[in-house]
Image (tube, rainbow, N blue to C red):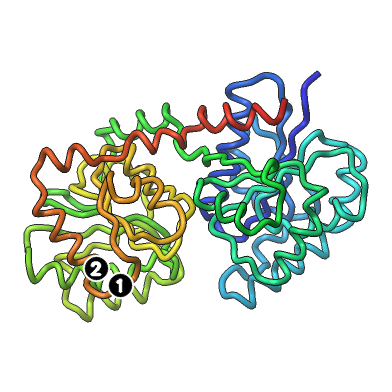
């Protein structure tokens, strides 16, 4: 008999967790016939993915009604208000769903406090799997909730070994429940198709050498720091441009910064793209300026694209993926002159050295198939 797996991932913003959730579901459906997998559409957050889900035979369950567009999504206070609204509206529907359908497993990604609380109150037949993404802030309330919920949780997964070690040191959970489960970032078939797609037309003509950075225009990605550091690098070398692909709440601020510095001919903010691999294939190196990542989706995509990587040593993924500096250049995160110096260091490396330190091998841990193999083991 097939096992029923439900995914709970009520996301306000379309961040990496959305991709991780969808790819995890897809990996179970693609590589096994042992599971019925469904995504709980809590408040309409998965509505725009229904066409994509249909093509991949992914089913959704409407928990309440579609009020996604009415919720505030940015700002610390506003997003917390949204989470409270989600919890209050979803409280009884989630109880009813779990009691009625009795799925074998519930894998929770975001707004995990609600299912954790419910599993402490009710004796559900379902096994609960908590996915921890990013280096968690172990504040008082989170520690108490996790400690209190520990007996109700079947497994706790972490995308990197560093985060796993951090959780082990905290002694909140029994170590036998902790599992390193790399995110299913790469779909090899899709990757090969896109990186070899020469029909894709870029936004600008790429007739120059450039460094590439990709990510949401937000505080986390630290693009203001990147722009300031690249300006310093230009004093040493005028032979490179900087391309930044993305979009988000800081877009107007970043454009204004580039304009005020007079760097419109050196730094290009391209917005979102349908094929980031096209740019990765042609870049000289990938630059990550983030304040935190776990593991860092674009970092892994660039490594798989055979790109040399220059990354901040932010917690928690980059250090591990770059083998602590053996497979790329790691610089002290958000530190003055560190990134500019690292770009200069890259120029000083000979071509053979640049080839040797690529980190494609580590990136292969984050394919959908590798993810499935590890997840399948404890779902049996």
Q: Is residue 175 left or right of residue 240?
A: right
Asked if the residue at tag 2 contacts the one at tag 1, i.e. Cβ–Cβ closer than 8 Å, the answer is yes
Q: Position of residue 139 (x, y in %)?
A: 66, 70
Q: Is residue 96 left or right of residue 345?
A: right
Residue 185 — which label?
none
Towards the viewer: 189 or 155: 155
SS at mark 2 in the image: helix
Q: Position of residue 379 (x, y in %)?
A: 71, 30
Q: Quadrant of residue 289?
A: bottom left
Towards the viewer: 114 or 127: 127
Q: Position of residue 112 (x, y in %)?
A: 72, 56
Give neighbour class at mark 2: few <14, some 14-19, many 20+ (Cα, 10 Å).
Answer: some
Q: Quadrant of the N terminus?
A: top right
**Residue visible at 52% across and 38% down in the picture:** 184
User: According to the image, label 1 marks what residue?
Assistant: 335
Residue 338 — which label?
2
Q: Quadrant of the C terminus?
A: top right
SS at mark 1 in the image: loop
Label 1 vs label 2: CA separation? 6 Å
Q: Position of residue 347 (x, y in %)?
A: 10, 54
**Residue visible at 14% across and 67% down in the picture:** 233
Give neighbour class at mark 1: few <14, some 14-19, many 20+ (Cα, 10 Å).
Answer: few
Eyeballing the image, is 188 above or below 285? above
């Amino acid at each position: 008999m097939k096992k029923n797996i439900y995914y709970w991932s009520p996301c306000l913003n379309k961040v990496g967790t959305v991709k991780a959730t969808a790819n995890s579901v897809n990996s179970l459906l693609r590589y096994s016939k042992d599971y019925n997998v469904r995504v709980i559409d809590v408040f309409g957050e998965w509505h725009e993915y229904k066409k994509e889900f249909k093509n991949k035979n992914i089913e959704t369950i409407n928990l309440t009604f579609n009020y996604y567009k009415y919720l505030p999504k940015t700002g610390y206070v506003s997003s917390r208000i949204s989470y409270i609204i989600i919890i209050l509206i979803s409280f009884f529907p989630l109880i009813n769903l779990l009691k009625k359908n009795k799925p074998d497993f519930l894998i929770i990604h975001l707004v995990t406090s609600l299912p954790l609380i419910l599993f402490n109150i009710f004796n559900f037949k379902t096994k609960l799997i908590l996915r921890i993404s990013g280096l968690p802030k172990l504040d008082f309330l989170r520690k108490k909730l996790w400690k209190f919920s520990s007996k109700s949780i079947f497994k706790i997964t972490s995308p990197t070994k560093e985060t796993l070690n951090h959780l082990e040191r905290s002694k909140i959970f029994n170590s036998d429940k902790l599992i390193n489960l790399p995110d299913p970032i790469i779909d090899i078939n899709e990757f090969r198709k896109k990186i070899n797609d020469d029909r894709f037309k870029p936004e600008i003509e790429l007739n120059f050498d450039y460094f590439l950075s990709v990510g949401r225009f937000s505080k986390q990605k630290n693009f203001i720091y990147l722009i300031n550091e690249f300006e310093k690098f230009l004093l040493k070398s005028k032979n490179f441009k900087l391309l930044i692909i993305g979009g988000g709440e800081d877009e107007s601020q970043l454009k204004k910064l580039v304009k005020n510095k007079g760097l419109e001919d050196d730094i290009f903010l391209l917005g979102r793209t349908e094929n980031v691999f096209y740019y990765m294939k042609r870049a000289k190196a990938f630059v990550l300026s983030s304040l935190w990542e776990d593991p860092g989706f674009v970092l892994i995509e660039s490594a798989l694209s055979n790109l040399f990587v220059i990354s901040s040593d932010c917690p928690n993924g980059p250090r591990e993926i770059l083998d602590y500096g053996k497979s790329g250049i790691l610089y002290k995160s958000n530190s003055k002159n560190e990134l500019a110096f690292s770009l200069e260091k890259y120029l000083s490396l000979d071509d053979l050295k640049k080839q040797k330190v690529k980190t494609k091998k580590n990136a292969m841990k984050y394919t959908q198939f590798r993810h499935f193999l590890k997840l399948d083991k404890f779902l049996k």
